[in-house]
Image (cartoon, rainbow, N blue to C red):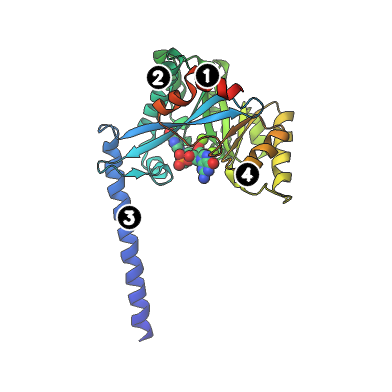
Amino acid sequence: RAKSFVREKYCFYEEEMSLELERRALMEQSLHQALERDELLLHYQPQICAQSQGLVGVEALLRWKQEDGRFVSPAEFIPLAEESGLIVPIGEWVLREACAQAVEWDRAGLPPIQMGVNVSPRQVEAPDFVEMVLRIVESTGISPSKLVIEITESLALREEEQTIEKLKTLQARGIQVSMDDFGTGYSSLGALRSYQVDSIKIAQTFIRNIDGIGEGMTIVKAMLAMAKSMDMHVIAEGIETREQFELLRDEGCDFIQGYYFDKPMAAEDLIAKYGNNEIAGSASA
Ligand code: C2E
Ligand code: MG
Ligand code: MG
Ligand code: MG
């Protein structure tokens, strides 16, 4: 009896596994077609100067709207795109779309802002990464200093000479590099120094714990001090409350990104909120 119980359990487990694999295979298949079918789009989340509370930049965030109108979360499909290598063509599309959007906003009279674009390790490690980025910068006409490439700690973890060189080449052209989700990976401070990023983004995990007098703030303060000493800007991510915003501002954090100010939004909503004089006036008031 025990044996058959074990077997049943095992079969059940196997069935679950194959269902999960099937689901992933199906999703990968439709992700293949997502680009051609025009199902991918970008939303933009504002980044606010902690002192002036004015708009200083946005982060482009990928959205996948499937045929049936359902949105699939990037947390779900980005890992799949990374594993399958689809992130390379998709990431190229994201970069072109984001740069073109920045130029369009510029023409529409939005004050000059930074455009943050996430790139996966797989993209950076592709042999033609630098050429691809420079080609897009040139063809869209974005001013290189407005582009911020967000890399992850998992890339820095490997600390490859070639990768460091690639990013330095882009930086020499005026493009900025930011370390995303800082503190969540396992990269060393040494890696941070070799990569010489222009800014770090403090992950929401650390922000969640700063309210009140917990030790959360100690870690954030250490990150801010370290960034200052390395001449990097700091962006705090996932700010949801006024208290979090004020704590970070008072500790000298430069930029704020989070639901407290704005959720990621469509390009036209961003121009509606930040593009006209009326809003510009109320933001500076
Ligand atoms: P990320 O780069 O760290 O982006 C920040 C994420 O935090 C976004 O989730 C954003 O919507 C969310 N967020 C911002 N403020 C708040 C807040 O106050 N509260 C909460 N709860 N969440 C907040 P999203 O858009 O779901 O993206 C998740 C991740 O997917 C991104 O994390 C990034 O790693 C990846 N991703 C998104 N777009 C791209 C892309 O174009 N290329 C690549 N390679 N990865 C991307
Ligand atoms: Mg990011
Ligand atoms: Mg992040
Ligand atoms: Mg991330």
Q: Is residue 85 left or right of residue 153?
A: left
The residue tagged 2 is: 100
The residue tagged 1 is: 146
Q: Is residue 231 above or below residue 245?
A: above
Q: Is residue 264 left or right of residue 221?
A: left
Q: Is residue 63 above or below residue 174?
A: below
Q: Are marks 2 and 1 in contact (CB under 8 Å)?
A: no
Q: Which mark is residue 225?
A: none
Q: Is residue 113 above or below residue 35?
A: above
Secondary structure under badge 3? helix
The residue tagged 4 is: 207
Kind of residue sitting beneath label 2: Ala
Q: Are marks 4 and 1 in contact (CB under 8 Å)?
A: no
Q: Earlier in the sequence, mark 3 or mark 2?
A: 3
The residue tagged 3 is: 21
Distance between mark 2 and mark 4 Cα atoms: 32 Å
Secondary structure under badge 4? helix
Q: In the rendered picture of this protein, how many numbered marks are placed on residues?
A: 4
Q: Are marks 3 and 4 in contact (CB under 8 Å)?
A: no
Q: Position of residue 20 (x, y in %)?
A: 33, 57
